[in-house]
Image (cartoon, rainbow, N blue to C red):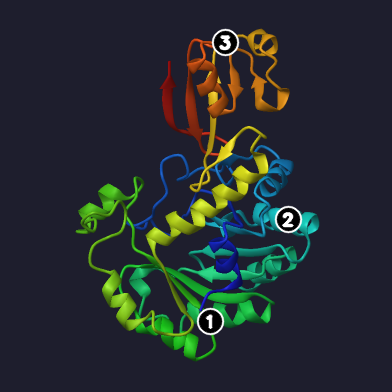
Amino acid sequence: MISKGCEQCAKGGKMVLFVYGYCDQRDCFYCPLGENRKNVTQTYANERPVENDEEIIQEAKKMDALGTSITGGEPQEALDKTCRYLRLLKEEFGEDHHTHLYTGITGGRENMRRLSEAGLDEIRFHPPYEQWGDLHGTEWEDILYIAREEGLTPAFEIPGIRAEEEFLEFLDEGAADFCNVNEFEMSQGNYERMQDAGYELQEGHMSAVDGSKDAILEEMAGHEKVYFCTSVFKDAAQHRNRLKRMAENIGREFDEVTDDGTLVYGKTYTDRERFEDLGVPDEFYTAKSDHVEVAWWLLEEMIEDGDVDDGEIVEQYPTYDGQVVERTPLA
């Protein structure tokens, strides 16, 4: 089973709204947050550091967001801010803008009511790993029913550390609507702690942890309400599709959008006047303060014909930080 939120994510249509980097409940050895996100109060919309509410709307429009995924840290520990953002998104994009939130604490009825009234659609609980298998009869069981009573769709979202039958029991009992299991991964943020805990990477894989996938596929993923999200799918589908949505929205007429969702163009330090003298149509280039960006194939032709001395082909992400993937010199 795949939830509405996951359907939108698979299409690259979910904006990721990181609201708060602190998580006072515990320091999970598998927490993937890097140093720029861990224990910070800065909000990020996708890769964009947010200075005001309008920038959240701008980032959502930039990717034609179908919905928003709210995460942290712990969003419930910054509840006022989280609820403000939920209201902002619903007011701007309407009720069809689907919102889901990841949380590692129960929060209680008052939090569930406030989140629901602010516009949250779906809440995904991640109970502490130490309590897996002993959640029945605790606040973790109670909060599932409370969340539903307050108008939210309750679910679990857990890392695939090991298969755990109790999550299936909650599904069969109707307490939770679904359970997402994310392939267990090592990241730059948790690599040393994961190694200290005895985990290693799968051979030939950049992030997936060795040894956990098979048991989960065998013991959990066959359940109709369990969805196993692989690290390959996250990179090859979710992330790539989001980049494509952004690239197609912000790409200039002369930018080439690749299958990976990157933008490709030419760059030269030749003066703008040279382009004007050659009669290059305006739609094929744009002049910056110290260089000119131009259709890559046109720059290649201009260099071959001797009209321009040199330049490069640039491939970069369409994200706020504009990270360059590759530079290919032309001469």
Q: Is residue 2 left or right of residue 219?
A: right
How many C-alpha atoms fall within 10 Å of the one at disc 2: few (<14), some, or many (≥20)? Answer: many
Q: Is residue 209 left or right of residue 265?
A: left
Q: Are marks 3 and 2 in contact (CB under 8 Å)?
A: no
Q: Secondary structure at mark 1?
A: loop
Q: CA distance from mark 3 to mark 2?
A: 44 Å
Q: Which residue is mark 3?
A: 270
On the question of residue 80 being in view, the answer is yes
Q: Image height check: is 31 above or below 290?
A: below
Q: Position of residue 329 (x, y in %)?
A: 42, 21
**What amino acid is at disc 3?**
Thr
**What amino acid is at disc 2?**
Leu
Q: Image height check: is 155 above or below 312?
A: below
Q: Which residue is mark 1?
A: 176
Q: Which residue is the extreme one toward the bottom?
A: 173
Q: Are marks 2 and 1 in contact (CB under 8 Å)?
A: no
How many C-alpha atoms fall within 10 Å of the one at disc 1: few (<14), some, or many (≥20)? Answer: many
Q: CA distance from mark 2 to mark 1?
A: 25 Å
* Residue at (56, 43) in percent of width and height: 41
On the question of residue 19 being in view, the answer is no
How many C-alpha atoms fall within 10 Å of the one at disc 3: few (<14), some, or many (≥20)? Answer: some
> What label sits on residue 89 in the rendered view?
2
Q: Secondary structure at mark 2?
A: helix
Front residue of 62 and 48: 62
Q: Position of residue 22 (x, y in %)?
A: 49, 50
Front residue of 246 and 252: 252
Residue 146 picture quarter: bottom right
Callout in the foreground (3, 1): 3
Q: Position of residue 53 (x, y in %)?
A: 72, 44
Q: Earlier in the sequence, mark 2 or mark 1?
A: 2
Front residue of 223 and 118: 223
> What label sits on residue 36 in the rendered view?
none
